[in-house]
């Protein structure tokens, strides 16, 4: 792949071939015929470029053509299984379409997200898939105004006319809660995070409406969002479970809360998992390893990746501005042992 | 962050201020004093730039300075918990040091890895942390010759004088296998993948030497490397477990094999997990959720991330070429319920 330590400049090539740098540049950019350069000369330049294994300078080329064939997938936390799984699926679709894709985490930090959007936009990536943190409206709207292809994922920004792929969080939470009620649980707690995010609000609202509709009392534990402090968060859960002994079922609002919560209840009492009704929002490969297997409201990760890329590739191909695609996908309640009647 | 649709060029700014573009450029690059531009003029330019919320063109700047403050972490599979966990830790250290970091998966594919290295090198990222697939020696060696800061991770390339951070895989496999033997298991199977990778060879060799030293027979299942076909791989494990009923313990060579294998034995018989001795190479937060908790040989992810970044940041700071740092870290056997005497 690499032959020389220093890439020869257009000038170097022009000197060797005794032609102008403009001619070299036209041939390099496939504009030889258009610029009326003779077939013989084009062939001579191309043969030489092949001979020296010439690789064009992509930075310079992207400055010229404005295209890099690089896409970016900005998620909340790349170590979250849900995002890394969708990322991996997106990566495969990108490669099939001759795009590369880069990942990075925003950690829901607006300043970091602003910097990353700025960085990628300046470095002229071709398109963005963004899990938007609250407060990032201005930057997204800047990208949209400049007709940079952007698709939002996991959360929408209601005030923006942007493409997005999300799931019906309200309905998912409703189905999950109703399933626990139907299995005979009466004191169902909802474990969530204290973040001003639309998808978390929707999950809470779905839980709350279903609980109240059944004539029960909502019991909600809101943990601070802090990916680095899992131990503190687990201790808070333990305190909550211990001081609310009436709780007979748990509905976790995300997969990392489930992971942490299951560890917490195991630490309280290894048998507790068999007594409680449990559902996790987000499925995991780890939920079928043991008994009881854990029920989950599964997000359609394959469909999400496919739709995100379908929308983005379409925007990359069609320069005219189509109406935004706003997709609300439905998830699937996967009933396993942990939510059955006890 | 963004104020204008079009970024004003140096020429636009120079015209408004009625000075030369060179002067604007010197001030922008902090070279005003050095170039003997008067304090008053520097202040006038800086005030105007602030006024119009001017953001320099990073592509152009990186062409000029050769620095982008962007690092790349190229892993095998970003959806593998081990890599995404280390990636997340690296990301935090990068931000603390005013670097951004991008992730991508090579999927152990040489061609894809070549393209990615080429892409990032052309786009002038400042440094690389690479989990090298077999066959990538030439590209790594090109980067080294060109004094691009590179640190290898998870695997070394014996024939290259490159910095690396790996763990003692042989010792880890030896300790894990010995622990199962000490717990009274006699027919310990090793579940691994059929990949020509040095770290997998070392794990197998550690297992094999320990088993043979104890006078037992090695029993090895090698699964094809194919991240996309987990179901086929699980079925192969089920066949293996069913047709080797003498097996009383399992040692999984990676965390994704553990996940798949535990699901396979759960599908054969939910009680089987209580009868077998089990150890996983790589730990997981999911191993403490249930009884039996799963024993693991834990890789020191925090130390790995810290050391990788320490080496890389040092290379970025010091332009002279220090001797390569070759770090072989030790992991920790975490003894949990699954590997105790039964």
Image (cartoon, coloured by chain):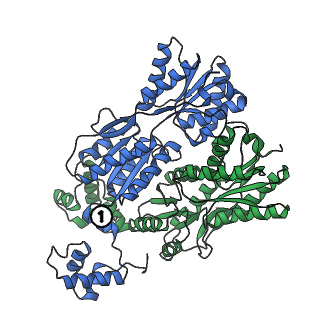
Chain colours: A green, B blue
Pinpoint residue B61: horizontal percent, then vertical percent.
Answer: 29, 67
Residue A332 visible, this orientation: yes
Q: Residue furthest top?
A: B215
Q: Residue furthest left?
A: B36
Q: Is residue B85 above or below residue B133?
A: below
Pinpoint residue B298: horizontal percent, then vertical percent.
Answer: 49, 36
Which of the chains bears the disc numbered 1?
B
Residue A256 visible, this orientation: no
Q: Is residue B174 above or below residue B65?
A: above
Q: Quadrant of the N terminus of chain B?
A: bottom left
The residue that label 1 is drawn on is B62
Pinpoint residue A89: horizontal percent, then vertical percent.
Answer: 56, 50
At a point 70% along the width and 49% down the height, the residue shown is: A242
The residue lying toward the viewer, choosing from A181 and A167, is A181
Q: Quadrant of residue B95?
A: bottom left
Pinpoint residue B92: horizontal percent, then vertical percent.
Answer: 43, 55
A24 vs A267, left or right, is left
At a point 46% along the width and 23% down the height, the residue shown is: B174
Q: SS at mark 1?
A: helix
Q: Is residue A35 above or below residue B24?
A: above
């Amino acid at each position: 792949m690499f032959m020389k330590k220093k890439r020869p400049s257009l000038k170097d090539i022009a000197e060797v071939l005794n032609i102008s740098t403009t001619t070299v540049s036209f041939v390099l950019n496939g504009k030889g015929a258009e610029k009326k350069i003779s077939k013989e000369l084009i062939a001579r330049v191309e043969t030489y470029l092949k001979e020296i294994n010439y690789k064009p300078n992509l930075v310079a080329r992207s400055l010229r053509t404005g295209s890099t064939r690089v896409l970016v997938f900005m998620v909340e936390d790349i170590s979250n299984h849900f995002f890394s799984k969708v990322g991996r699926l997106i990566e495969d679709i990108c490669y099939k379409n001759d795009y590369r894709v880069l990942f990075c985490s925003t950690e829901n930090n607006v300043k970091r997200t602003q910097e990353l959007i700025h960085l990628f936009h300046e470095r002229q990536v071709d398109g963005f898939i963004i899990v938007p943190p609250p407060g990032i409206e201005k930057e997204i709207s800047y990208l949209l105004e400049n007709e940079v292809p952007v698709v939002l994922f996991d959360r929408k920004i209601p005030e923006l006319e942007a493409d997005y792929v999300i799931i019906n969080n309200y309905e998912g939470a409703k189905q999950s809660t109703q399933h626990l009620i139907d299995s005979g649980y009466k004191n169902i707690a909802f474990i969530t995070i204290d973040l001003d995010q639309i998808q978390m609000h929707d999950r809470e609202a779905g839980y709350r409406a279903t609980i109240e509709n059944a004539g029960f009392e909502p019991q909600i534990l809101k943990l601070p969002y802090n990916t680095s402090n899992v131990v503190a968060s687990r201790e808070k859960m333990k305190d909550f479970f211990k001081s609310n002994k009436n709780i007979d079922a748990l509905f976790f609002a995300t997969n990392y809360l489930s992971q942490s919560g299951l560890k917490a209840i195991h630490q309280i009492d290894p048998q507790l998992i068999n007594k409680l009704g449990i559902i996790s929002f987000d499925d995991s490969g780890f939920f079928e390893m043991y008994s009881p297997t854990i029920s989950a409201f599964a997000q359609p990760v394959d469909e999400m990746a496919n739709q995100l890329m379908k929308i983005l590739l379409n925007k990359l191909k069609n320069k005219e501005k189509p109406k935004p695609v706003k997709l609300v996908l439905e998830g699937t309640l996967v009933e396993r042992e942990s939510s059955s009647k006890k």
